[in-house]
Every structure is written in C-alpha cells, then in structure tokens.
Amino acid sequence: MSDKIDFKIREREMLHNRVCRILRRAIIKGDFKPGERLVQTEPAELIGVSRMPIREALRQLESEELVILEPHKGAIVRSLEIKDIKEIYELRSILEPLALRKSMENFNQQDLSFLTYLYKTMKGTDSEEEYIEMNANFHHFLSSKCESPRLLGFIETVSRGFSQDTPQLISGQIKKSNKEHSNILNAILNNEKAKAESYLSEHIDRTGQQLVELMQNENLNI
C-alpha cells in the first residue's frame, strides 16, 4: 500500500513539474504577454490537465517572480527583463561553482558514479523530457554535498527555474551542454577543484549570454 501511495505522489509531482515547464517557457518566449491574466481554466484546457497542477505550477511561478497571483482572479504575467536574466546568471556563475568546490570535498566514489550515470544518461537519451530531468539532477547534485544550507538556499532562490528550460529554448543547447558537462565531470573525477569551478562558471555564463541573445533577437517579453 505504501509503495502505491508513493507512486501517486511522484506522478503528481512529475505532472506539476511538466506543467510548470510549459507555462514557464510560454512566459519566457512571450506566448503569454506581460500583464496578461491567466485564469486556471484557460491553461488547463490548453495543456489538457485539471486545474490542480495548474494551481501548483502558478504558485511555483509566483515564487520565481514570473507571475503575480491575485486571490480569486488568477495570475498576471510579470514583465521579464534582460537585466533580470543577466543578474540571475551572474549570481549563479559565482554561487554554484563555490558550492561545487565545497561538495567535492565530500564526494565519495558512489557520488562520482552517480554523476557519471547522470552525464551518460543525458548524452545517450533521445528524449528531451528525460534530458531536462537529468540536467536538473546533474546541476543539483553538483551542489548537494556542500554542507552549507545558506548557500544552497541562495542558489535555489536565484535560479528561479530558468536552467531547466534552456534545452528547449536555446538552439544547440543540448550538444553544447553535453560537451561542457563532460569537462566539468572529468575535472571532478580527477579532483581538480579549480578546473571544475571554472568549467561550471563558463557553462553557466555561456548559457546566460545565449538566453539574453535569444530574448533580444526575438524581442521576447521585454
């Protein structure tokens, strides 16, 4: 019985995450315009889900400052500006490499094997959905052993979900990320802390720059 309950919880969480990604991408790409009101029934019909995962996703997007929730009125899309993206990726490029250095002091062989598994799964999958999930897990695990709750809290606050969606926003992102992830992983396996930090920082910087270029070129939501 307990296994069945756990399974349902995971399925619900997976649905919420998928819905959140769909809405986040639509906001970033400008399909939903700043100031536009999202009533739960409308995106629920568009995506083909009930209102519950829509409600949960909108709460997540509110924490990411992409929408403003108004009681009994739905959500209003906030304006997403270039300076916001630049600041997010600048901070990520500083905080996440610091967390990685601290984590490397605590990684054991099992942790290294798990990181290798995540990388190989990303490199070998043809599923964009699986890639996004493994990419999020890979980045999360790089910081997971840093034993600094405040630092992890800052990273979670700053990230705001954007890193999960770049494979579906930036052309060629998966191929570029696989190469950069390989450099990061090899530096970790060789216990080269400075290289691992540098490779991760460069990876985050490059992604941020390309996301900014995408928004500027297509005049998305700015």
Image: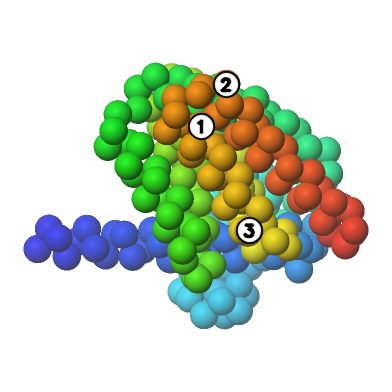
Q: Quadrant of residue 155?
A: top right
* N-term mark: 1 or 3: 3
Q: Amino acid at mark 3?
A: Lys
- Image quadrant of residue 20? bottom right
Task: Determine the secondary structure under disc 2.
Answer: helix
Q: Check if mark 1's residue and mark 2's residue have beta carbons within 8 Å.
A: no
Mark 2 or 3, nearer chain start: 3
Q: Is residue 42 visible?
A: yes
Residue to which mark 1 is pinned: 187
Query: Which residue is nearer to you in this view: 38 or 86?
Result: 86
Residue 73: tell me if it is visible.
no
Determine crowd level at label 1: few under 14, some 14-19, many 20+ residues with C-alpha closer than 10 A: some
Work out whether residue 208 or residue 178 is closer to the camera in this orientation and state it: 178
- Marks 1 and 3: CB-CB under 8 Å? no
> Callout 1: helix, strand or loop?
helix
Separation of marks 1 and 2 at Cα, in angstroms: 8 Å
Residue occupying the point 63% across, 58% down: 175
Relative to 189, does residue 175 appear above or below in the rendering? below
Q: Which residue is mark 3?
A: 175
Q: Indicate which label's residue lies in the foreground, 1 or 3.
A: 1
Left or right, residue 52 beside residue 179: left
Q: Which residue is mark 2?
A: 194
Residue sitting nearer the eye, 160 or 86? 86
Q: Is residue 45 left or right of residue 150?
A: right
**Neighbours of disc 2 within 10 Å: few (<14), some (14-19), many (20+):** few
Which badge, 1 or 2, comes first in the chain's sequence? 1
Residue 220 spot, x, y in % from top left: 84, 59
Of 156 and 209, the residue lying toward us: 209
Image coordinates of residue 112 in percent, x first then y, are 35, 37
Residue type for callout 1: Ala
| Image quarter of residue 160 | top right
Q: Is residue 221 left or right of residue 208?
A: right
